[in-house]
């Protein structure tokens, strides 16, 4: 399981219920991680299985220090970014 990170400056600019992205193949772990993300005040968004880890790490397309170019996204944009890649993967198979 991989949980995305936010730097101190990003956390200071984050709003309650902003999305926080994670990846896991374990349904039990997903339930617990989503609970913890909600307790922290964020909206959990699953990026996919563990193979999606690179998307949420530094340099990945779902990371502020990667494809997001230093910005945070709202839940609608996060859903769109995650879903667009899932749909592209489904077309490729």
Image (cartoon, rainbow, N blue to C red):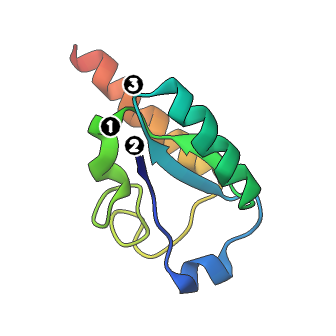
* Pointer 2 with pointer 1, Cβ within 8 A: yes
Q: Is disc 3 surrounded by few (<14), some (14 to 19) or many (20+) residues within 10 Å?
A: few
Q: Give yes or no for contact between labels 2 and 3 (Cβ–Cβ under 8 Å).
A: no
The tag earlier along the polypeptide, 3 or 1, is: 1
Q: Secondary structure at mark 3?
A: helix
Mark 2 highlights which residue? 1
15 relative position to 54: left or right: right
Q: Quadrant of residue 10?
A: bottom right
Mark toward the viewer: 2 or 1: 2
| Relative height, residue 78 to residue 13 (above, below) | above
* Nearer the camera: disc 3 or disc 1: 1
**Residue at x 27%, y 51% (from the top left corner):** 54
The x and y percentages for residue 79 are 57, 41
Distance (Cα) linking label 3 and label 1: 17 Å
Identify the residue under disc 1. 50
Q: CA distance from mark 2 to mark 3?
A: 22 Å
Counting from the top left corner in percent of width and height, residue 77 is at: 58, 49
* Residue holding disc 3: 87
- Image vertical order of residue 18 relative to residue 75, above or below: below
């Amino acid at each position: 399981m991989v949980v995305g990170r936010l730097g101190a400056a990003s956390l200071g600019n984050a709003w309650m219920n902003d999305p926080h992205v994670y990846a896991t193949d374990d349904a039990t772990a997903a339930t617990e991680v989503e609970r913890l993300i909600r307790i922290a005040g964020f909206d959990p968004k699953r990026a996919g299985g563990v193979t999606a880890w690179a998307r949420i790490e530094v340099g990945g397309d779902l990371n502020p220090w990667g494809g997001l170019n230093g910005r945070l996204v709202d839940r609608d944009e996060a859903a769109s970014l995650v879903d667009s890649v899932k749909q592209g993967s489904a077309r490729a198979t």
